[in-house]
Amino acid sequence: MPTTYAHWRFGNTCIPTLDQDLQTMIRSNREVFDYGVHGPDIFFYYHCLKANKINEYGNQLHDASYKSLLEQFAQNYSPVMDKTAYLSYVLGFTCHFVLDSYCHGYIERKDETSTASHGKIESQFDRYLLVKDGYDPIKTSVTTSLKPSKSVANTIAECFPNIGQKVIYQTIKDQRMYLNLLKDSSDIKRFVLGHAMDLVGVSSFKDLFLTKSEDPVCKDSNLRLDKYFEMASKHYPVLAQNVVNYLVHGEPLMDYFKHTFGPKADYQTIPVYSYQEEQGYSVNELQK
């Protein structure tokens, strides 16, 4: 999964591509949309230092087809009182699916063919986008759009009634807390946190720290993921409109939703190039 800033940025990029009525709806429900863009990832933060059934549920959602999840959202749609908030959350969630499905195959191949871990590739892409947008990747907070509230938790719980509002509220509070914990410009704090991660057996979490300088091993992947980001943003409005028409009018879902959030079946055919080769590589087609 591209990580926190990339997903927020993708959602923010996609809003203007929608019909005006949908743009207005989302802007009136921006707080729930901004949680939707993080998709199933929110469940990874629930008491994240030890495995639990909520974390595992997040993994299950990532491995399921998005069509099956949309069918669940459709079943829960009718009794919802605030349908605009519900739809806004689902459209944010769809942002997460589209970006993940475009990027995950390449990330998996890059992970398999280089020394960069999955988490390192994602965090370096976040860093790349922050710098591209003119922000200091060390000092800039990536949680300003995350405003946990019981109202937001209630909307999310309407999509996931099997989890419930109380647990979801704790989940989104944990998300903000842990992301803020990882974001700090102090070398001392980073050292202490890194040592603590080693002690509790989550050393891989250290790859989520944003670095002061670009990691050379990810220079090529930053360029490729940026290309997928742009192509995914072109695909999103068509897919999003289909989601709305499906939930509201029962229109059949497009074939693309058969995919999961993870790599597609043919991901091993995706080329991984050096930085120099990547500069001349183009991504010109929507994924199928």
Image: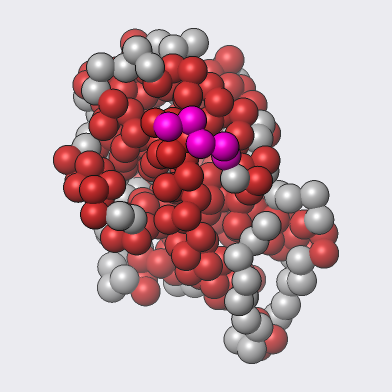
The spot of residue 224 in percent (x, y) is 59, 72
- Residue 79 vs 8, above or below: the answer is above
93 left or right, relative to 135: right
Q: Is residue 53 visible?
A: yes
204 left or right, relative to 95: right
- Residue 245 vs 220, above or below: the answer is above
- Determine if the magenta segment contains residue 9: no
- Determine if the magenta segment contains residue 251: yes
**Residue at image location 28% in from the left, 73% down from the top:** 134
Which residue appears farthest toward the left when viewing the image?
28
Q: Which stretch is magenta?
A: 249-253
The spot of residue 77 in percent (x, y) is 40, 21
| Residue 61 figure quarter | top right
**Residue at image location 17% in from the left, 40% down from the top:** 28
157 left or right, relative to 109: left
281 left or right, relative to 252: right
- Residue 134 vs 22, above or below: the answer is below
What secondary structure characterizes most of the magenta part?
Answer: loop
